[in-house]
Image (tube, grey):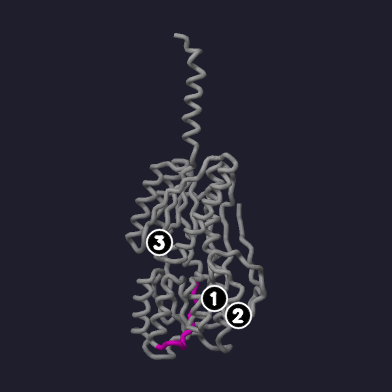
Amino acid sequence: MQYHRLLPAIFILFMGHFAHATEVLRIGVLYWSMNIPGQVAMRQGLEAEAERLNARAKAAGLPMLELIPQVAGDGPGGIERQISQMQDMVAQRPAVIIVQPTDNAALAQPLRAANAAGIPVVAYDQYISGGKLAAYVTSDNRQAGYLNGEYLAAQFPPGKTLRLILVEYPHVSSTVERLEGFLDALRERQRSYQVLRRYEAVQPAEGRAAAAAMLRDFPTPGSIDAVFTVNDGGGLAIVDALDKAGRQEIMVASIDGDPQSVENIRAGRLTRIDSAQFCGPLGAQAMRHAEALARGRPVPQHTLLPVFPVTRDTLSSYPGWQGPIPASFRKSWPSSQPYWNNLPQNTP
């Protein structure tokens, strides 16, 4: 048998198979919740960017991106579900995995499994404690809390001790950093405060439960000066409950930039400041990093996107969750940093 005559046909067959194998770059995408509007906006930004990148790849004759999406869901069940989803995704061996973690610690083992399999992992919005991330993209969460704290400190007479309710969520990095930034700003502005009570909420049902407990624990008008909520997912339900109970004397500071929260500021309905994320650009940045890694290009290890302080004074400059990020401006309240910083920050 003349094997040398078969070599060209074998080569063509092999190259045809190889071309087929590289027609797409599979990207696993693990979302957290579709009940938190800001996270929905992040997904929209991510998937719109994937479409844009695919149009560019098609024009250049490059392999296309194929997203493999999974949604974990809310609460403890969502945490457990995402662990299983990431384990399954590692077994599928996509080119890259993008994940919005439901819990900082829970995904450590699946991340280490991805590391062992040589699959780059891009986390966005939240961090994973354990294993190695190829890239991490998030809003500047400390800036978000800090903006809230310095603004709220300026709303009360000098020397007054602020009676505070904190609505926190200690299970993910973003909300921890927001609370830290908020309290740091109060201390740096030399605003004394008393934490009356802490509640935990990051989703609407948790917010409703926290509000019911708050009204039960502090039924007397004037007993609370201000409430800080780490996100609008839980915070909006708290504002609704306080408003219905006639507790308009309470000032609320929140984070995310949910359109309803922005409307509450416009209407003078409890919320005085909301440090808004640029959710669409955040998801898009995670997608750009994943695409670069899938094509073998380097990316920054850590990217922070700025957040925008929405107040009655800044409403006209805020473009909404999908951006674009507006120009820097001088703050109308006392601050050790007089100008709002609109620049993303990257580290190698």
Question: 13 or 128, which lies in front?
Answer: 13
| Discs 2, 3 touching: Cβ within 8 Å | no
329 sits left or right of 319 in the view = right
333 sits left or right of 34 in the view = right
x, y percent for residue 275: 54, 72
**Callout 1 crowding tier (Cα within 10 Å): few <14, some 14–19, many ≥20:** many
Which residue, given by chain and number where applicable, does mark 1 sit on?
148
Which residue, given by chain and number where applicable, does mark 2 sit on?
313
Residue 3 is covered by the magenta coloring: no
Q: Amino acid at mark 2?
A: Asp
Badge number at residue 71: none
Question: What is the quadrant of residue 307 in the picture?
Answer: bottom right
Q: Secondary structure at mark 1?
A: helix
**Callout 2 crowding tier (Cα within 10 Å): few <14, some 14–19, many ≥20:** some
Badge number at residue 33: 3
Residue located farthest toward the left when viewing the structure as drawn: 77
Q: Quadrant of the N terminus?
A: top left
x, y percent for residue 211: 37, 79
